[in-house]
Image (tube, coloured by chain):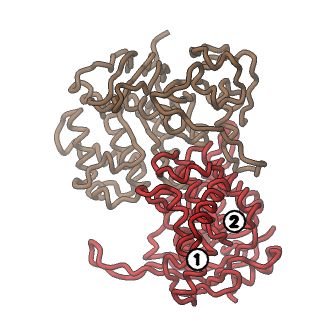
Chain colours: A red, B brown
């Protein structure tokens, strides 16, 4: 077990029933080929990530573009191959699985994307798209198959008769419901929701978030909820992990992260979200970070955040901070706490 | 009292569809004072972007038409203005910033040349002077080493930096008015904070008025002085910003505010607005919001509702405005 995983199990209350998903020291590297300047090299998109998700638990994974949060989610399902580390689903090592086992394991872990069209074929009636995973894995007869499709549509708040319609006949929110129906068709344990509500208007977004909460309750689902919208994550997540430049810099129960952020990056991130209350917004302390996230192909030495950190110290420029227990719960990767 | 810098008055716009002309804006009215930032707020289909494109004279010439109303900038009528005069005003007296800067930046030219080109078109002068101005505005928007960065191509900038370049270009001729359509929506939140900060200091320094089109009520609270809330092609409420969040005067505004997930504390179940925005061409009778409104009465279903002035200076398009006390977020 790595240092980080140790610190986490030490600090976080044990999840009843043990974790559904565990990630240990996960690395994902991409090989950069050629490009305009003809430079090759490797880009470590995910660096030493540890996390775990309990039964009926939602882990919010937040960070800005390029932080590696989507790659982490994809690597857990092996939609991209991890370079190093372990992913376990119900204790079974997904990373070591051959094709057959992996195919079977995918029944238990599914993904919901920002764009529902990525799981709905525009040329097929939606009932067919929803039945596709059933056909691959269950081989139901005609009657059982259409009964199951109708049931799934009702689970996501749509009418069973909608199975015969095409994706373009639905609104954006309804299409996301359809994508969720397909994702839960095989009774998965874990859903990875990658910016699943980001493209929706706020009223529709809330309908989908409420639906996800209902389904979690009803079917005992666990969620890895990847999002850049922190207010949404505060609402839906039980615990939160904050990523920056491929690393988890802080993780803790949601209230602790939002009420008492331990990492300077988390503090800056939270202070940058404008609150829908003009008076409070004017009075809030705001931390405006300078510059942007460094290029992941050339990460800075020491702490990955030191180039933008308002509280940077000498040690941060050369020594990578260890993962330590944070005051109030969870862990943080920052020299201020060592 | 002199007229505001920008006056949009009773503006109605139609789009061509397979089944004929369909109304997308209905009697939109609002004003923007000098140095003021006004938020144009609404969800998709509200008409906020069509309104901003109308002000810029950028509605597609085939397939759209202004059927009524007036848009005046500093007293000059923009509706029906000949194309060449409009083009001369755009980039000079009125300029724009869009969500995706690459739609306005040409990938084949250095950013300094593109800004200099705008300056020369509107202000004349030598190439050297225009280039100098380009470097100067790039410096103003916080681009380090502006002199050498002016020689870079758009793809050599990150998303946040490209948005700064866009703002530099928009500012280059010291416009009276900037139309900013979701300028920070595609940006990460820490970069959004930088860009909002920049827009604020530009306003303070140059007194530029801004129409800020957005769906994000947090951003509106952060940067706007007043807001115009749009729903289904109509203005449903206009208000000074503190009053809007404290005591909204239209049920749609109330619904939007209550639906915003809160950063400060987890609330119970998230509020939703039942149903969805009606598509253009099939607007409900009576109040357009009535099928989704929690305060609906029978008369709302068939009575056309006009925008009415309120005591505090705002407006509301709700029949029940005088007997409703609506909940805000502040």
Front disc: 2 or 1? 1
Quarter holding the N terminus of chain A? Answer: bottom right
Find residue B317 and name its label: none
Q: Position of residue A296 (x, y in %)?
A: 46, 73
**Marks 2 and 1 in Cβ contact (< 8 Å):** no
> Relative to residue B41, is residue B258 drawn left or right?
right
* Residue at horizontal 32 percent and vertical 59 percent from the top: B155
Tell which of A195 and B291 is nearer to you: B291
Q: Secondary structure at mark 1?
A: helix
Which corner quadrant of the image does residue B287 belong to? top right
* Residue at horizontal 61 percent and vertical 42 percent from the top: B218
Tell which of A280 and B126 is nearer to you: A280
> Relative to residue B113, is residue B160 drawn left or right?
right
Q: Position of residue B130 (x, y in %)?
A: 23, 42
Location of mark 2 (residue): A240
Crowding at dot 2, Cα within 10 Å, few <14 / some 14-19 / many 20+, comes out as many
Q: Label 2, label 1: how many angstroms apart (C-alpha)? A: 24 Å
Tell which of B328 and A274 is nearer to you: B328
Residue B34, above or below A60: above
User: Is residue A38 something that shows in the picture?
Assistant: yes
Location of mark 1 (residue): A106
User: Is residue A305 something that shows in the picture?
Assistant: no
Disc 2 is attached to a residue of which chain?
A
> Relative to residue A18, is residue A130 drawn left or right?
left
Of the numbered discs 2 and 1, the one sitting upstream in the chain is 1
* Residue at horizontal 54 percent and vertical 29 percent from the top: B230
């Amino acid at each position: 077990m790595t240092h980080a995983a140790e610190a986490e199990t030490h600090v976080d209350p044990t999840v009843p029933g043990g974790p559904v998903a565990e990630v240990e020291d996960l690395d994902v590297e991409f090989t950069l080929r050629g490009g305009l300047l003809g430079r090759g090299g490797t880009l470590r998109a995910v660096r030493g990530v540890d996390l775990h998700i309990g039964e009926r638990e939602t882990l919010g994974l937040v960070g800005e573009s390029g932080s590696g949060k989507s790659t982490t989610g994809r690597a857990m399902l092996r939609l991209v191959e991890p370079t190093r580390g372990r992913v376990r689903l119900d204790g079974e090592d997904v990373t070591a699985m051959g094709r057959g086992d992996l195919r079977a394991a995918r029944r238990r872990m599914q993904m919901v994307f920002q764009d529902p069209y990525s799981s709905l074929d525009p040329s097929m009636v939606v009932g067919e798209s929803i039945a596709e995973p059933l056909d691959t894995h269950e081989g139901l007869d005609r009657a059982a198959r259409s009964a199951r499709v109708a049931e799934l549509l009702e689970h996501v708040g749509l009418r069973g008769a909608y199975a015969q319609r095409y994706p373009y006949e639905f609104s954006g929110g309804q299409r996301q419901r359809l994508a969720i129906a397909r994702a839960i068709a095989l009774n998965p344990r874990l859903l990875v929701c990658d910016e699943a509500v980001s493209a929706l208007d706020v009223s529709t977004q809330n309908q989908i978030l409420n639906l996800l909460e209902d389904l979690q309750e009803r079917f005992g689902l666990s969620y890895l909820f990847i999002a850049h919208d922190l207010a949404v994550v505060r609402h839906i997540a039980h615990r939160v992990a904050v990523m920056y430049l491929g690393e988890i810099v802080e993780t803790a129960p949601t209230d602790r992260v939002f009420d008492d952020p331990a990492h300077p990056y988390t503090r800056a991130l939270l202070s940058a979200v404008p609150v829908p209350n003009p008076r409070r917004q004017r009075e809030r302390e705001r931390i405006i970070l300078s510059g942007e996230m460094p290029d992941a192909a050339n990460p800075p030495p020491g702490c990955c955040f030191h180039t933008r950190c308002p509280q940077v110290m000498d040690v941060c420029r050369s020594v990578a901070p260890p993962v330590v227990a944070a005051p109030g719960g969870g862990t943080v990767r920052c020299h201020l706490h060592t | 009292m002199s007229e505001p810098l920008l006056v949009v008055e009773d503006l109605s716009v139609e789009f061509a569809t397979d089944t004929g002309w369909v109304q997308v804006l209905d009697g939109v009215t609002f004003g923007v004072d000098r140095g003021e930032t006004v938020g144009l707020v609404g969800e998709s289909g509200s008409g906020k972007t069509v309104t901003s494109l109308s002000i810029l004279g950028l509605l597609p010439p085939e397939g759209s038409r202004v059927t009524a109303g007036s848009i005046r900038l500093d007293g000059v009528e923009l509706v029906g203005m000949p194309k060449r005069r409009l083009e001369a005003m755009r980039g000079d007296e009125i300029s724009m910033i869009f969500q995706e800067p690459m739609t306005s930046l040409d990938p084949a030219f250095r950013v300094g040349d593109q800004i200099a080109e705008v300056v020369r078109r509107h202000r004349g002068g030598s190439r050297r002077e225009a280039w100098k101005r380009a470097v100067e505005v790039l410096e103003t928007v916080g681009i380090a080493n502006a002199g050498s960065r002016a020689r870079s191509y758009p793809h050599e900038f990150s998303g946040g930096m490209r948005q700064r370049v866009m703002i530099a270009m928009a500012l280059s001729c010291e416009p009276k008015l900037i139309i900013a359509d979701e300028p920070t929506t595609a940006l990460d939140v820490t970069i959004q904070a930088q860009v909002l900060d920049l827009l604020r200091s530009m306003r303070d320094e140059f007194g530029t008025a801004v129409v800020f089109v957005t769906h994000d009520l947090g951003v509106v609270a952060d940067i706007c002085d007043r807001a115009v809330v749009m729903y289904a092609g109509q203005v449903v409420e206009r208000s000074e910003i503190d009053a809007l969040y404290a005591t909204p005067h239209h049920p749609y505004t109330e619904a939007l505010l209550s639906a915003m997930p809160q950063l400060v504390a987890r609330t119970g179940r998230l509020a939703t607005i039942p149903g969805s925005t009606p598509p253009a061409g099939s607007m409900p009778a009576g109040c357009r919001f009535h099928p989704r409104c929690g305060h609906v009465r029978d008369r709302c279903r068939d009575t056309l509702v006009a925008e009415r002035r309120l005591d505090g200076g705002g407006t509301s398009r709700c029949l029940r405005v005088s007997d409703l006390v609506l909940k805000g977020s502040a």
